[in-house]
Amino acid sequence: MEAIGKLLLMAGAILLILGFLLTLLGRASFIGELPGDVSVKWRNVSCYLPVVTSIVLSILATVVLNLIIWVLRK
């Protein structure tokens, strides 16, 4: 029972941090407008591919998750 409680607390903390980061990222005007993000408009069809933004967010998520795992193992 104690393990489930710790798991729920950790999940809640991660969701809180994630919500805070998403709120801050929503205010950042550079997200989605980095060089390398592809935007194609043709007649009445538009397609947006945030290639570089996805790579940057993936690297950040990897670093954060590795730090969390490192802290939890100690």
Image: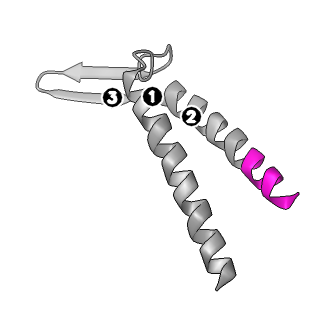
Q: Is residue 37 above or below residue 47?
A: above
Coordinates of residue 37 in the picture (x, y in percent): 45, 21
Instruction: Name the N-terminal-most of marks 3 and 1.
Output: 1
Question: Looking at this view, is 70 or 34 the one in front?
Answer: 70
Magenta stretch prevailing secondary structure: helix
Determine the image quadrant of residue 24. top left
Q: Amino acid at mark 1?
A: Leu
Q: Residue at x 72, y 39 (%)?
A: 63
Which residue carries the number 1 mark? 24
- Residue type of the residue flagged with mark 2: Leu
Would you name the residue on which mark 2 appears? 57
First in sequence, mark 2 or 3: give its number.
Answer: 3
Highlighted range, magenta:
66-74
What percent of the width, then of the height, locates residue 2?
68, 81
Q: Residue at x 62, y 61 (%)?
A: 10
Q: Nearer the viewer, residue 42 or 12?
A: 12
Q: Is residue 44 left or right of residue 16?
A: left
Crowd rating for badge 3 (residues with CA inside 10 Å; few <14, some 14–19, many 20+)? few
Using the numbered discs, state the Cα–Cα distance from disc 3 to disc 1 in whole angstroms: 22 Å
Query: On the picture, is 6 further left or further right than 36?
Result: right
Above-or-below relation of 69 to 63: below
Badge 2: residue crowd in 10 Å (few <14, some 14–19, many ≥20): few
Secondary element type, mark 2: helix
Q: Quadrant of residue 57?
A: top right
Where does residue 11 sit, x and y in percent of width and height? Answer: 56, 62
Identify the amino acid type marked 3. Answer: Tyr
- The quadrant the C terminus occupies is bottom right
State the quadrant of the N terminus. Answer: bottom right
